[in-house]
Image (cartoon, coloured by chain):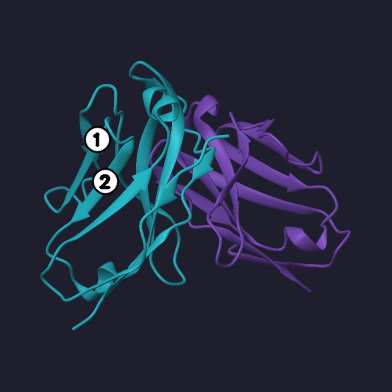
Chain colours: A purple, B cyan
Amino acid sequence: VLTQSPGTVSLSPGQRATLSCRASQSVRSRYLAWYQQKPGQAPRLLIYGASSRATGIPDRFSGSGSGTDFTLTISRLEPEDFAVYYCQQYGIFGGGTKVEIK
Amino acid sequence: QVQLVQSGAEVRPPGSSVKVSCKTSADTLSSSSVSWVRQAPGQGLELMGRIIPVLGVPTYSQRFQGRVTITADRSTSTVYMELSSLRPEDTAIYYCARDLCSGATCSWWFDTWGQGTLVTVSS
């Protein structure tokens, strides 16, 4: 099981967002990924291998963590970053964190 | 550029089946696993199953075992997902997504997604 927190976070553009993904047992970092999903769109791969940015992903997005605790950080929120974010390991997705405009 | 193109929206009565397609290129199919992920309205993402087309053997999530069938037609570079015994709670958007594989070893990072197919189950 992957548990994401918070469920929803309200932030302003320019602020830093820190999203958590906790696994019920230790996972291999190589298989931990993060996705962004906007309304009406398919998910988009942001981070793979816990910390590597996918092609075309801005460097304000970063991933970190190991074992059971992983973090997605957005250093300075841009208007287009307000969306839902999911972590995933093998066939399991977390429940998602919604980043909304404050 | 890798692309996955899915078939259009479907409306089905309860108890029936639906078959959704996901078309790509031969090159993509030969180096990928294709998974099916569903998203009920306002809900999160749920993996239903996947197939590595060059190996041909699908695997299914326990939750869908017995109701879902995933197949690959290498001659048309198309992967299919059929869901049977439909109920209203199967109303969802169904996505195909691919990850890179080398033989049976896959990355499990879904770097390309189809556009999604809305399946509505209603009498």
- Check the picture and name the quadrant holding the N terminus of chain B: top right
A77 lies left or right of B91: right
Q: Earlier in the sequence, mark 2 or mark 1?
A: 1
Q: Which mark is residue A4?
A: none
Say which residue label 1 marks: B73
B78 lies left or right of A82: left
Mark 2 near mark 1, Cβ–Cβ under 8 Å? yes
Mark 2 vs mark 1: same chain? yes
State the SS at label 2: strand
Q: Residues within 10 Å of mark 2 (few under 14, many from 20)?
A: many
Image x and y of residue A98, in percent: 62, 64
What chain does badge 1 belong to?
B
What chain does badge 2 belong to?
B
| Relative vertical location of residue A30 with respect to residue A45 in this rendering, above or below | above
The quarter holding residue A5 reads: bottom right
The residue depicted at 67 percent of the width and 31 percent of the height is A51
Q: Residues within 10 Å of mark 1 (few under 14, many from 20)?
A: few
Q: Residue furthest right?
A: A14
The residue depicted at 45 percent of the width and 60 percent of the height is B44
The quarter holding residue B92 reads: bottom left
| Relative vertical location of residue A98 with respect to residue B80 in this rendering, above or below | below
| Relative vertical location of residue B88 with respect to residue B32 in this rendering, above or below | below
The residue depicted at 69 percent of the width and 37 percent of the height is A63
Say which residue label 2 marks: B80
| Relative vertical location of residue B25 with respect to residue B89 in this rendering, above or below | above
